[in-house]
Image (cartoon, helix red, strand yellow):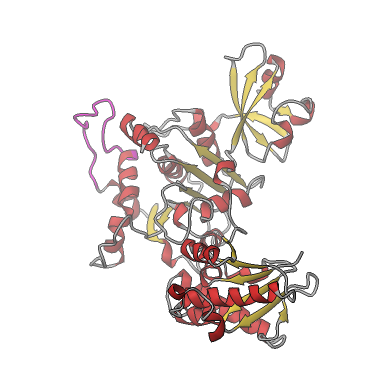
Amino acid sequence: MRKTFVLDTNVLLHDPNALTKFQDNHVVVPIEVVEEIDRFKRDPSEKGRNARQISRLLDEFRQRGNLAEGVTLDEVSGGTLRVVFCRAETLAQLPPELRSGNGDNNILAVALEQRLHEVMGSQPPVVLVTKDTNLRIKADAVGLIAQDYTTDKVDIADLYPGFCELWVSAEQMDRVKDAAGLALSSLPEGSGAVAGLQANEGVTLIDQAQPNHTLLARFHARSGSLLPLQRAAKVKLGRIQPRNREQTFALDLLLDPDIQLITLVGKAGTGKTLLALAAGLNQVADERLYDRLLVTRPVIPLGKDIGFLPGDLEEKMGPWMQPIIDNLDFLLGGGDESHPQRGGQRAPRNSWSDLKGMGLLEVEAISYIRGRSIPRQYMVVDEAQNLTPHEVKTIVTRVGQGTKIVLTGDPYQIDNPYVDAESNGLTWLVERFKGQVLAGHVTLSRGERSELAELAANLL
């Protein structure tokens, strides 16, 4: 059955192409939404760019016919689009508390008017689509159906982990170590996760006769075979060594030049950023596979913003990039773990600045990445859970020839008020690139920062 979807402003600002995502249904845009989009169009942020894109899209549909009467969104599906005014008589039918005429109430009145047409039998069921929790509550209170915009949402509980377990015989485990590896076609169909293996998925092989005998491997989709993990053991990363199975899977992906896109998801202290930077420094400074290590992160504060920062761009970026600098300082010898209380002999704090001086390291704001083409670089996007799907698309499409990009983040630590654990760009990217030959993913769950950090991440 066709439905009528009334869209709120935040839905269009979140996804400028939302108008085209409702297939053969009817889409209604209240005039209040158009007014709010007009107020956002001068904003220099991503919201402003999205607002301008929506305005252009609405203008394209206007050329097909009268938006007040309705225009066809897609000739094949038959969906339609209308721009509707809020009538004073409909606003008067709202409860007294909701008759103030503000933006949300006007949108609510438009949805209520469409609902009245539905009751009279002249229109399909009406659904108000909004990302505003309070507006959904108001809609429910006046008897309207309301729902969140779920087109780009990913169920965080079912997020692809990037690895699995597979029970095999001892003979099959030995064949994994051969040059050609263990062909997946040689395993019986009922062998656990065989049917659902994704490209570059990590696999823990368990001996059926001796469960304590295990082997870590990775599924190579091009050859259709399982090959053992070898890169983490061969490459020397100083004090950095994988401490658990998940970190071993992650490091093998990070050190593989054939994998161009890697996503690392995990709670605080699981080593996402540290592993990404360690692998990047090795491939930039030692192996010379890439010309530069490029590190960036969104500038979204935790808690109340302290305001504008003084100085030039590099000085302004200093506080935002301090977590990255701390990791680089640790990798370049800034402390001795064997003496945690004394700290050991520390290297100079400007060791990371030396890398910048040699042209091997670049730290910059993510705000200025639009329009760039980034070839032959190892790129790390930290705190990617604070990015929207549209922003992630903008970043990944900047990747040039010979560049590897790594996105890290924790979906449960989001500071951006416009995304959540299920609608952020990082989890969206994991789901979209699952099974692609050029991409790999690992979800890290075991904290290795410290005993206290792990306890806090689990209890708080």
Quadrant containing the C terminus is top left
Q: Position of residue 453 (x, y in %)?
A: 33, 35
Closest to the observer, 251 or 14? 14
Question: Magenta residues: mostly which secondary structure?
Answer: loop
Q: Residue at x 57, y 52 (%)?
A: 429
Q: Does 337 sit above or below residue 332? A: above
Q: Is residue 342 visible?
A: yes
Q: Which residues are magenta?
A: 331-349
Q: Does 21 sit above or below residue 253? A: below
Q: Position of residue 250 (x, y in %)?
A: 52, 37
Q: Is residue 292 visible?
A: no
Closest to the observer, 433 or 338? 433
Q: Residue at x 40, y 34 (%)?
A: 458
Residue at the extreme left of the image, as rendered: 342
Q: Picture quarter containing residue 85? A: bottom right
Closest to the observer, 299 or 230? 299
How many badges with numbers are in the image?
0
Residue at the extreme right of the image, as rendered: 76
Q: Residue at x 41, y 33 (%)?
A: 447
Q: Does 26 sit above or below residue 398? A: below
Q: Residue at x 59, y 81 (%)?
A: 56
Does residue 340 belong to the magenta stretch? yes
Q: Picture quarter containing residue 330? A: top left
